[in-house]
Image: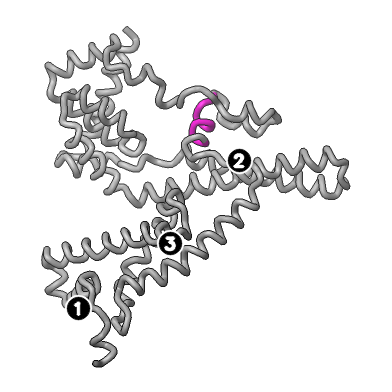
Amino acid sequence: MDIAQSVELTPLTHKVLEYQKEMTQASARKKSSFKALEREVIQASYLIIYTYPVAIKVLVEEDASDFLLKLVNRVPKLLKDFFFEFISYESYLKKIIFWQSNTFIHRKRNQERHYVCAFNEPEEIERYFYSTSKPYSFYQEGSWDSMVSQEEFIYCPSDTWNTQGTISLQLKARMAKSHKLRSRILQLVLLCSDSLNAQQVSCIASFLSMDENELAHLIAEAIDKGYRRLQITNQVRSTRDFHFYEKLFLERELMFLISQNADPVYIERTNRRLMKERMHCSNRQKESRNRPGVVTHATVAQMLSVPKGTIDSGMQALRKIVRDLVDD
């Protein structure tokens, strides 16, 4: 028997080969069947990338999602480059996953060795940055305990989401009589899409007497349309967090050198690096604060099929209504 014939053509391999064939045909790429096939092979690849390293105990499950995110953008190229010759697509992908997972672990361990300070989740960093009236006060000298706020997020205090409060009830009563007001509140929600979590979406859906799945779909669509803006914003925050961690590391290093009566040359060198990291972190934080929203007025106007001017004037009118309610 020929060797090529002895290799099993798995269902996934067959679909990948079919996908590659249709990729070369412009007419086939426009068909809905091609889109469905593309989605199927990509999702199957994601599943293998996520589960295989855990199955062979190279990665723990907590790291599998990070590893998948590292390879997500490479999957289309892997599908394109695959060549069926004595090996199925699954085996081809697993070989690549094995090599890449070891590289991933190596880089992760190197990074962990570099930072001796404890890591915080991104949400914890956001809490710290936005939970003080002095947003840059952490550059001043102070204890580590004072650097992490135990208060709730300033942009999400519990009373903000109390739909039974006086102002909320007044606004809801006015909204029941005015369809235009309800539309403006929905527009505001869509403009803030990237700042909402699942619990808040559920609360807003109840407040607007709207199906939660429908609202979640609109929010997801708004974020998807502003994906490029979201990428830039996340990149700025990631850079800021990097400098923040570096600053913490250098602060501890400086404290250690001083406690050990180290040579002033080393202390001065570390202090200069610390000042530089403080400056970079401050600049990136200011840039992060000044970033425009992920969802623009034009995006919401396009989604709701209304002129952009309607959104602009609607937000001004809504601001006046809420301000009057608060003042009263």
Q: Of the two numbered discs 1 and 3 on the same chain, state the one appearing first in sequence.
A: 1
Q: Which residue is mark 3?
A: 56
Q: Amino acid at mark 2?
A: Ala
Which quadrant holds residue 319? top left
* Pointer 1 residue: 21
Q: Residue at x 42, y 66 (%)?
A: 97
**Camera-nearest label, 1 or 3:** 3
Please tell me the numbered disc located at residue 147: none
Q: Quadrant of the C terminus?
A: top left
- Residues packed near mark 3 inside 10 Å, few (<14), some (14 to 19) or many (20 plus): few
Image location of residue 280, percent across then percent down: 61, 45
Front residue of 200 and 2: 2
Under mark 3, the amino acid is Ile
Magenta: main secondary structure equals helix
Residue sitting nearer the eye, 82 or 142? 82
In reply to whether residue 184 is colored magenta, the answer given is: no
- Assess disc 2: are there few (<14), some (14-19) or many (≥20) residues with their C-alpha within 10 Å of its C-alpha: few
User: Element under label 3?
Assistant: loop
Residue 59 lies, in percent from the top left, at 47, 56
Pick out the residue farthest to the front. Answer: 1
Rendering colour mode: one colour
Instruction: State the CA–CA distance, disc 2 to disc 3.
Output: 29 Å
- Residue stretch in magenta: 125-132
Query: Which residue lies most toward the top here?
Result: 328
Which of the two discs, 2 and 3, sits closer to the camera? Answer: 3
C-alpha span from label 2 to label 1: 50 Å
User: Residue 123 at x, y = what percent?
Assistant: 47, 36
Mark nearer the N terminus (2 vs 1): 1
Mark closest to the chain's N terminus, 2 or 3: 3
